[in-house]
Amino acid sequence: MKRGMQRAGVLALAFSLSGCAGILVGGAATGVSMAHDRRTTGMVIDDQTIELKLYDLLNRQLPPGNRISTTSYNGTVLLSGEAVSEGARRQAEQIARHFNTPPVRMVHNELVIGPPSSLSVQSNDALLTTKVKTALFQINNIPDFDPTRVKVLTDRGVVYLLGLVRPVEADAAANVASQVGGVQQVVTLFEYIS
């Protein structure tokens, strides 16, 4: 009986420590990612807040039937997906433009009018995003280029690229993304630095 309780205690300890290890590894990965990001830590947090709060606000204020993704990078918001009507599309843009906690600097409204994309289309978009992110690691002829500084989003085969990049980095990233099989179009929404 005593030996069984000891084993149970060891198992419980092992499971609790494995969770801690995951938290430590996850925290370290986030720290490494932040070290490479050209945005300030505060801006990264603001972008995450904008995405979550704006997504919630759009779901509460727009009519049902939309599939709208909100992506924020350095205060620039990309609205992608499908809206049920032109009115809903315009309303989504207005809500995003007037969102101010934290403030939105610019809005790119790439919403199309129509029914939500099928699960197979969304799955293909996720696969294309992964392929483009992987392909960006092929860029090794540009000093100081870090592919993790390019945010990639795919919607209906259209790849959107965001980030704080130099013009030469933007050109290389767009070129590589356009060569990935299945990509129908590449839209660059970069913010340029010198």
Image (cartoon, grey):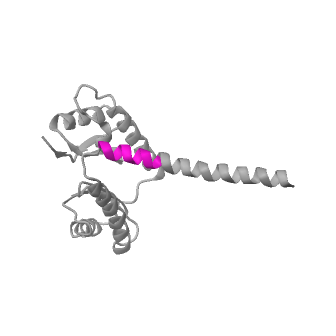
Residue shown at 30% from the left, 31% from the top:
179
Q: Is residue 4 visible?
A: yes
In terms of depth relative to the viewer, which is nearer, 19 or 135? 19
| Quadrant of residue 181 within the rendered picture | top left
Q: Which residues are magenta?
A: 26-36
Left or right: 82, with 192 as reference point: right
Residue shown at 24% from the left, 46% from the top:
38
Left or right: 11, with 169 as reference point: right
Left or right: 160, with 18 as reference point: left
Q: Residue 7 location, x and y as percent?
A: 77, 50
Q: Residue 93 location, x and y as percent?
A: 24, 65
Quarter that holds the N terminus: bottom right
Quarter that holds the C terminus: top left
Q: How would you classify the magenta stretch by its main secondary structure?
A: helix
User: Is 52 rendered above or below residue 158?
Assistant: below
Q: Residue 113 location, x and y as percent?
A: 31, 60
| Quadrant of residue 92 within the rendered picture | bottom left
Residue at the far right in the pictured view = 1
Q: Residue 125 location, x and y as percent?
A: 40, 45
Residue at the far left in the pictured view = 194
Q: Is residue 153 visible?
A: no
> Is residue 85 located in the magenta-colored stretch of the structure?
no
User: Is 83 rendered above or below residue 133?
Assistant: below
Residue shown at 54% from the left, 47% from the top:
21
User: Is 37 rendered above or below residue 74?
Assistant: above
